[in-house]
Image (cartoon, rainbow, N blue to C red):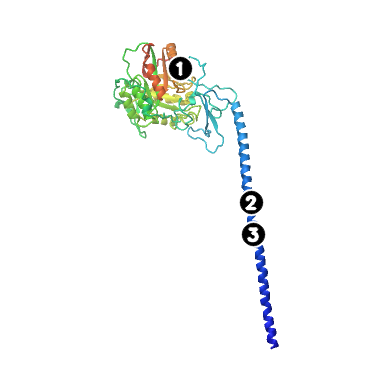
Amino acid sequence: MNDDEEDAGGGNEPDEMFETGSEVGESDDEDDDEGDGEGSGRRPIVYIAAGVGVLLLGIIGGAAFWYLNNGAEEEVAQENPLPEGAVQMALPPRAGSSLNALGAGEDNQTTETLETNEPEGEAETADASDEQPKDGAAQPSATENQIMSSATLGSSGLNAMAGSGAADQGVMIPSVTAASFREVAAQPKPIPLAKAPARALLEQVEGLNGPLPMVSKDGEQLPWEVYARPLTGNEQGQRVGLLVTGLGLSRAATMAAITKLPGEVSLVFDPYGTDLNGWLLRARLAGHEVFVGLPMESENFPAEDPGPLALTTTVQVADNMKRLHSILSSFAGYVGVVSTMGSKFSEAEGQLKPILAELKKRGLMFVDGGAIARSVAPRIAVEIDLPRAKINLTLDAPPSPKNISKKLRQLEKLTKAKTTAIATIRAYPSSIKKLAEWTRTLGEKKFTLVPVSAIANKQLID
């Protein structure tokens, strides 16, 4: 029995130990719980403090960035002050010789300055060129610096819409509706021109969307003479010609030029326009002779971008000839071509001469857009006996009513001095309105408005 008691006593010892261990374990758990409670109380305070710190750092950093950046802008503004009425905008950098390959991957951007006012001391003698001075020392390009030319106020090119308006320049499509021209009265019932094109003056060429113009097989009929608006024989006084450019892109602007301007005004359709054959029909029904725009490479790319069909110095003559044929085949029935931009291409005699020779071969007239005074196009035209004319003045650069009125007065003085003169303008509402008003005053001023074809070969070549 003593043995049983001993066994029983020995069996009770582990139970006591287990119970003691449980009590100890419970005590530790309670301590841990108390520790967790204190930690969870401190954590929100730490988070709040960290958030406030981040917020303060953000405010201080932002204020410092604004202060430093504002000072840098003021320094740049002081170094490159803008003329009165000018605005600045960023342009993509040029990254290649192609006219349509605007660089990607370059971080730096140049700025384009767009003039909206002309200097008061502008010479009264007209020259449509915006000639850039050339020094012996290397000068930054127009796109690497600020282009201070009114010609950059918009463009007729396709890929560099730097702005709106003056010569235009990315595709220049006036953002207007028919209501924009409501103040301008339509012209009286016009006398339509003969139906065009003439089938005998068309050549079908494989690979082109349309036919090319050609001289008749007997050599007697030339497209530029057949499609020209004929004179009445009553023209008296000094002659002035007007060209409205960039048509075929905006329906409202094109219809306004056709219906609200006298038939003696010649119209220039952009080769990038749509339904050009339809527009030619409407124009001739309203009495207007028609030209097609011939885009050429500009020194001011990309502020002035003549688009993918432009004649350039960066390709072979054969490639430029293909582009010329694409333009000439865009529609039919026009008098000739009017060069647009071209401040660079018009100096490249080796590239330009084959183009002018092709125009002569096809019986067309060439009108030099007057991009620069040093253009070799007029001289080559004289040498090869190509019917030619040159634009003397751009009327709406920029297209403000005040500036257009000023340029019209300048055109009058120029016409008196040279007997004949040609001016160009775009179909903006202010341009159409001013031009319509001005043409009604020509009789009393002893000027005669004539189609541009009537001035062919009558201007002196400097």
Residue 305 placement (x, y as % from top left): 47, 30
Residue 36's disc number: 3
Q: Residues within 10 Å of mark 2 (few under 14, many from 20)?
A: few
Mark 2–mark 3 CB contact (< 8 Å):
no
Q: Position of residue 334 (x, y in %)?
A: 35, 25
Q: Earlier in the sequence, mark 2 or mark 1?
A: 2
Q: Is residue 68 above or below residue 48?
A: above
Task: Please tell me how crowded label 3 is: few (under 14), some (14-19), or many (20+) other residues with Cα within 10 Å.
Answer: few
Q: Position of residue 410 (x, y in %)?
A: 45, 15
Residue type at numbered disc 2: Ile
Q: Which residue is mark 2?
A: 45
Q: Nearest to the eye among marks 3 and 1: give it.
A: 3
Q: Which mark is residue 406?
A: 1
Q: Residue furthest bottom?
A: 1
- Check disc 1 and report its element: helix, strand or loop: helix
Residue type highlighted by circle 1? Lys
Q: Secondary structure at mark 3?
A: helix
